[in-house]
Amino acid sequence: MKKFSSIEDLKKAGEKGAKSLFPSDVKIVVGMATSGIASGADKVYEALSVEISKRQLPYILSKTGSMGMDFIEPLVDVIEKGKPRVSYGKMTPKKVPQLIEQIVNGNVDHIKPIYRTDEENTIITQQKTPYLKGLLPGYLQDIPPMGEIPFYKKQIKIATRNCGVIDPENIEEYIARGGYLSLQKVLTTMSADEIINDIIQSGLRGRGGGGFPTGVKWQSCRKAHGDIKYVICNGDEGDPGAYMDRSIMEGDPHSVIEGMIIGAYAIGAHEGFIYVRNEYPLAVANLARAVEEARYHGLLGENILGTSFNFDIKISKGAGAFVCGESTALMASLEGKAGEPRAKYIHTVEHGLWDRPSNLNNVETWANVPVIIARGSKWFSSIGVPKNSGTKVFSLVGKVNHIGLVEVPMGIPLKDIVYDIGGGIPGGKKFKAVQTGGPSGGCIPASMMDLPVDFDSLWEAGSMMGSGGMIVMDEKTCMVDLASYFIDFLVFESCGKCVPCREGIRRMSEILKDICSGKGKVGDVELLEKMAQAIADGSLCALGSSAPNPVLSTIKYFREEYEAHILDNRCPAGVCKALITYSIDPKKCTGCGLCVKVCPTQAISGEKKKVHKINNDKCTRCGACMESCKFEAINVK
């Protein structure tokens, strides 16, 4: 067994990893994160394997994580000696023979790459990586560099620096990108106080939602009384539409492990836990493999890197309870108890897991640590805005053209994310709002598109950063219905331990449902506001105290929609079924009969090539007719 015990051992592994990243022959890399597999990347990978074997080509076929461009998956990268890495989007098994043919012939006649990576551009490394610079082959000169693609132009990849670049199953490729050199540095040249001071000076705040200064938390845990201490990684990402942590665990698990080892050394812990959702099978598998690899090479266990420091990690799978994302509920679950929170005046850095000092950070926070150690606190704090250093990873989903994972500097205007990176709203519809911070977050209206995206600005606007979910909504979104959806989610996920959360948000859900169904009463909005304050003040944990945010923010910025539902029995967005009617525009209807065929209740009648009509007594407002109509003849009022 080869254990790394010195800087020389790491350098040799890095040299081997560099040859794997930049081989002497052709290397084809397929994005095989969950997002890629869901788009058919596994079938593309299989087709590439068959084609390479059939042609008896000496090509290397490899896997990687997600580069974030989910809207153009499956993604395939081609790396040839002396040429830049080029990326192909929307690859299919049928296109594979064409791709191989043009690689063999040295051209891009059949399938044009979407971008090339011939310099670092937006990707941060822990040490310089030999991206190729210089003259390009003629046939690649009109392929734009990664840094000029609108989706990437304003991104800075730090936490996601290796996702989509390295094979997550190859520790040597991680080391080639500077991996574990930060660990070697702290174990041999830095004291615990120096490490913690670096993290404090960097301004890194917890990326799990609370935004508490990471270095301050480490310092408190180090000073806490007790010989046994723990470090914990929170990978229990439960927000609807959020998958930032999943992508890092899938695409770069060693960055999380290295960050945890550095944190453990600074705090004085010798045992760590990664708590990850059981619904993330690929993340669990890649983490488990990475832990075994690190242990095999002496990066976990006893006498790490030839020093006297001992530390090991265990992986614990959660059962999908949203409340277990809360620190004390997570620790209760780790202990084998029901995932219920406890009073916040008991600090986990002093009395955490098994009543011992425990430091909990989320996946993204740990992934930032090795880069801060390598590049310095001043470098990290120079990115972002005052009191909000560095970058934040967001899952950009909803009514936006470029759905995907983005990593942007703190303080970037909201409009830059939605329009420059996200490509704007599909179908030419109007942008209405962005919901940030998960089900306990708030909605930011279009009128606040210049809002800086950072912890403090979002909080002042009535929302929150959360773990990084960002859901874009267009003009066809009903804000009352949206608030009802998120409150329903929280009703289901509440652990039920405290009355304000258990009963309060259930009652809020009932009122919102009444409003959406046309049974709302004058005074309901004011009642929701009063209840929200009581729930926030009286709940035991952050799930309850932040639960009213979707309701409060939608009332604050879209009060007129609540009033239209209650006073006018009307849903302005045309969503709430009890408050809308469907009709057919006689000027646009051609009598094609498609709507008749798809109507499940036979509510539409009319002769062929003549104007049709909808019987609203039979109509269930399912929307099937609207989706099938090619002439936009269906009106909703």
Image: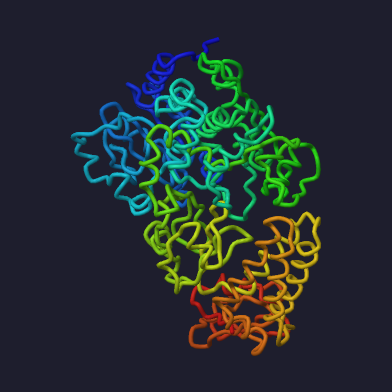
Residue placed at 44% from the left, 56% from the top? 402
- 393 horizontally vs 575: left or right: left
Residue placed at 77% from the left, 49% from the top? 340
Measured from the top left, where is residue 380 in percent x and y? 39, 43
Snapshot colouring: rainbow
Q: Viewer-proximal residue, 520 or 124? A: 124
The answer to whether residue 248 is visible is: yes
The answer to whether residue 581 is visible is: no
Q: Viewer-proximal residue, 303 or 128? A: 303
- 616 horizontally vs 427: left or right: right
Measured from the top left, where is residue 147 in percent x and y? 31, 47
Name the quadrant containing residue 283. top right
Measured from the top left, where is residue 567 in percent x and y? 66, 89
Name the quadrant containing residue 371. top left
Q: Is residue 290 above or below residue 67?
A: above
Q: Viewer-proximal residue, 531 or 430? A: 531
- 218 horizontally vs 408: left or right: right
The C terminus is located in which quarter? bottom right
Measured from the top left, where is residue 280 in percent x and y? 63, 41
The N terminus is located in which quarter? top right
